[in-house]
């Protein structure tokens, strides 16, 4: 705190004596007749508890000695990456995918050409059969048995 603070007599009286710790927490109350539950607020609100804590610190007392609950541990600040544009965020993933595809490209091109040539010859043979043209067998060294013109 940067300025000298004046506390009310009510706050100063409340830090003079210790309190049971349960009065600083909200309580759940069960209605005996209906069985319904509801919350009762704490005797001292969080704002008044903060005033009591500050008054204790200024007077040299430990806030927990009068029954105030300990402060929760401070959490580290969350770091969040900048949003950026979607194409910028996705660029490394896209580049990795492209690199992976380019790695096997020579084999993929070779396979594609073989499949494409086979599809072309199959189409050609079907067309020639429809036209009624007789074909011979392949005489190449590969012994594929493919029909030829």
Image (spheres, rainbow, N blue to C red):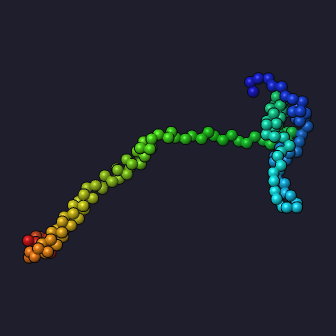
Counting from the top left corner in percent of width and height, residue 30 is at: 84, 57
* Res. 137 in view: no
Position of 85 with respect to 7 (left or right) is: left
Outermost residue toward the top? Answer: 3
Q: In this rendering, is residue 112 above or below 5?
A: below
Query: In which quadrant of the rendered view does residue 136 lie?
Result: bottom left
Position of 149 with respect to 92 (left or right) is: left
Q: In this rendering, is residue 90 above or below 63?
A: below
> What residue is at 30 percent from the left and 56 percent from the top?
104
Picture quarter with the N terminus = top right
Position of 100 with respect to 118 (left or right) is: right
> As rendered, which of 16 and 89 lies closer to the eye?
89
* Res. 16 in view: yes
Counting from the top left corner in percent of width and height, residue 124 is at: 15, 69
> What residue is at 87 percent from the left and 29 percent from the top?
8
Picture quarter with the C terminus = bottom left
Counting from the top left corner in percent of width and height, residue 128 is at: 12, 72
> As rendered, which of 75 and 125 lies closer to the eye?
125
Position of 106 with respect to 77 (left or right) is: left
Image mark count: 0
> What residue is at 83 percent from the left and 35 percent from the top?
52
Counting from the top left corner in percent of width and height, residue 73 is at: 71, 42
> What residue is at 57 percent from the left and 40 percent from the top?
79
């Amino acid at each position: 705190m940067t300025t000298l603070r004046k506390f009310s007599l009510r706050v100063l009286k409340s830090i003079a004596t210790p309190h049971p710790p349960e009065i600083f927490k909200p309580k759940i109350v069960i209605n005996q007749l209906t069985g319904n539950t509801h919350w009762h607020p704490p005797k001292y609100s969080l704002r008044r508890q903060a005033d009591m804590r500050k008054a204790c610190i200024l007077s040299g007392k430990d806030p927990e000695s009068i029954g105030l609950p300990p402060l929760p541990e401070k959490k580290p600040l969350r770091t969040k990456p900048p949003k950026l544009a979607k194409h910028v965020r996705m660029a490394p993933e896209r580049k990795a995918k492209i690199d992976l595809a380019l790695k096997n490209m020579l084999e993929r091109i070779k396979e594609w050409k073989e499949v494409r040539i086979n599809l072309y010859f199959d189409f050609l043979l079907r067309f020639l059969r429809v036209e009624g043209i007789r074909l011979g067998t392949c005489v190449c060294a590969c012994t594929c048995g493919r029909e030829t013109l």
